Image (cartoon, helix red, strand yellow):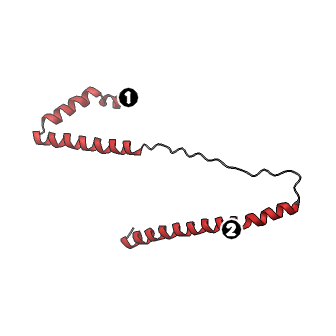
Amino acid sequence: MRYLTRFSPFRAIQDLRVFLSARRPHELGFLALAIVMTTLLIAGFIHDSHEERVYKREITYFQSWPLTRSDEEIRAQQAIDLPKELALKAELERRQKERQAQFKKYDDQLTKWGF
């Protein structure tokens, strides 16, 4: 417990006062400027990190089918929907490959720079 007796707020304030009294005026000015600049930088990061969530309403509509429809009707509808699904899948793969190419470009630049 004797170790904790050295950690006194009164001693800390007295030590700070002695330290500041031994400084020249221009050193105190630069100290104040450094404190202000650091505080502004941290406050700027804190302020910039707050981002409002964008509310995006997603409504999904489904087709309503009667329970009495036949297997032929189901297969006919699947044949109609198949080209749409394949086009969506091809578009997704194209976007993924494009994104991979962008990441590869950045990776090559970083490798060239030595990172």
Instruction: Point out residue 74 in the picture as x, y percentages from the top left corner.
Output: 83, 60
Query: SS at mark 1?
Result: loop
Tag count: 2
* Quadrant in which residue 76 is drawn: bottom right
Within 10 Å of disc 1 (Cα), the crowding (few <14, some 14-19, many 20+) is: few
- Depth check, front residue: 98 or 35: 98
User: Is disc 2 placed on a helix, strand or loop?
Assistant: helix
Residue 1 vs residue 87, the one in the foreground: 87
Write down the quadrant of residue 46 in the picture: top left
**Left or right, 75 with reference to 50:** right
Q: Vertical placement of 26 versus 72: above or below?
A: above
Quote the CA–CA distance across marks 1 and 2.
Answer: 74 Å
Residue at image position (79%, 62%) is 77
For the C terminus, which image quadrant?
Answer: bottom left
- Residue 24 visible at all: no
Which residue is located at x 61 percent, y 47 percent?
58
Which label's residue is closer to the chain start, 1 or 2?
A: 1
Left or right, residue 20 beside residue 53: left
Three-letter amino acid code of the residue under disc 1: Met
Which residue is tagged 2? 86
Label annotation for residue 1: 1
Residue 78 seen from this side = yes
Q: Nearer the viewer, mark 1 or mark 2?
A: 2
Of all residues, the one furthest to the top in this rendering is 10
Residue 72: percent from the left, percent from the top? 87, 63
Instruction: Give coordinates of residue 45: x percent, y percent.
Output: 36, 45
